[in-house]
Image (spheres, rainbow, N blue to C red):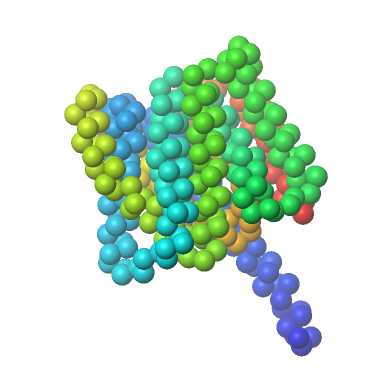
Amino acid sequence: MTAHDSATRPTAIAVSAGSGTLLAALGVAAFSLTFPATSWALEGLGPWSVTACRMLLAGAIAGVVLLVGRVRRPTRGQWGALLVVAGGTVVGFPLLTTLALRTSTTAHAAVVVGLLPLTTATYSAVRTGTRHSRVFWAAALAGAAVVVTFALTQSGGAPTTGDLYLFAALLVCAAGYGEGGRLARVMPGWQVSAWAVALCLPVAAVGAALALHTEPARLTWHTATGLLWLAAGSQLLGMWAWYRGMATIGIARAGQLQLAQPLLTLVWSVTLLGETPAPAAPLAAVAVLVCIAVTQRSR
């Protein structure tokens, strides 16, 4: 290696890490609008209809893009991971959080989902054998403790049905994120997201037909806007940026950026939904933001 190469290599690595962090942050910003968009969609549709129509719209958009772009099909060994991604991030997390939002406020749900970085990091460590420093885990556990304390305090010391839905959503989403981040190292992040939602098209079509037949439906401006964002913004744009960012800076480290999501969602819950969060909500969100700085500096 020449002196010139050794001098430029750290700069290239820094630029790559910076772009990866930016992409992961873009994904978090897109995800922060998911709960407000879901609340809007629930104004005119039932929870099963919202989930199925969201999948159907996202799958249709992704299918067109894949066909027009003549994207090569994933290899046989990649289909299993894509099924986990689809089950966790396309079906499981959207359905469980939509069911939770029938009884939980957007602000409350946002803070509880602050546990997602810890569950993602844990899944990654178990799945890939990745080791993290004690400082990393201490900061991640501190953020998780803040979230759990907040949830129990707001619910009178015991988890509600909505909380149980949210905790289940964390588990399935962590698996989807973990497998999606691994796939994004060998295929473009947008393709990971596109193939995952395209896989769900048959289920989404049948589910939408059944749900719309059994649940009351009333199309409003809020409902249409919410569904459009869930399909194109959260499911496609957000996932593309998120998987690409995870592939660049690592699954666990990117996951810690998601600790900022509760604070962003709190902002949207006030400005878009007119909610009045509990006084402890902003404090809890800021506390987990502190954990981000610690985890990002730890090796």
Q: Residue furthest front?
A: 76
Q: Residue furthest top?
A: 156
Q: How many marks?
A: 0
Query: On the rendered image, what quadrant is the C terminus found in?
Result: bottom right
Residue 196 horizontal side relative to residue 212, left or right: right
Is residue 196 depicted above or below 1 in this figure? above
Q: Is residue 82 visible?
A: yes
Residue 11: image location, x then y, percent: 70, 72
Residue 33: image location, x then y, percent: 46, 39
Q: Name the residue: 60% across, 35% down.
A: 114
Query: On the rendered image, what quadrant is the N terminus found in?
Result: bottom right
| The one of 158 and 236 positioned closer to us in this rendering | 158
Residue 141: image location, x then y, percent: 72, 36
Q: Is residue 22 visible?
A: no
Residue 90 horizontal side relative to residue 296, left or right: left
Instruction: Choose top left, top right, bottom left or bottom right for residue 159.
Output: top right
Q: Name the residue: 46% across, 62% down.
A: 77
Instruction: Choose top left, top right, bottom left or bottom right for residue 19.
Output: bottom right
Is residue 143 depicted above or below 121 in this figure? above
Residue 138 horizontal side relative to residue 73, left or right: right
Is residue 86 depicted above or below 22 in this figure? above
Q: Name the residue: 56% across, 33% down.
A: 113
Q: Residue furthest bottom?
A: 2
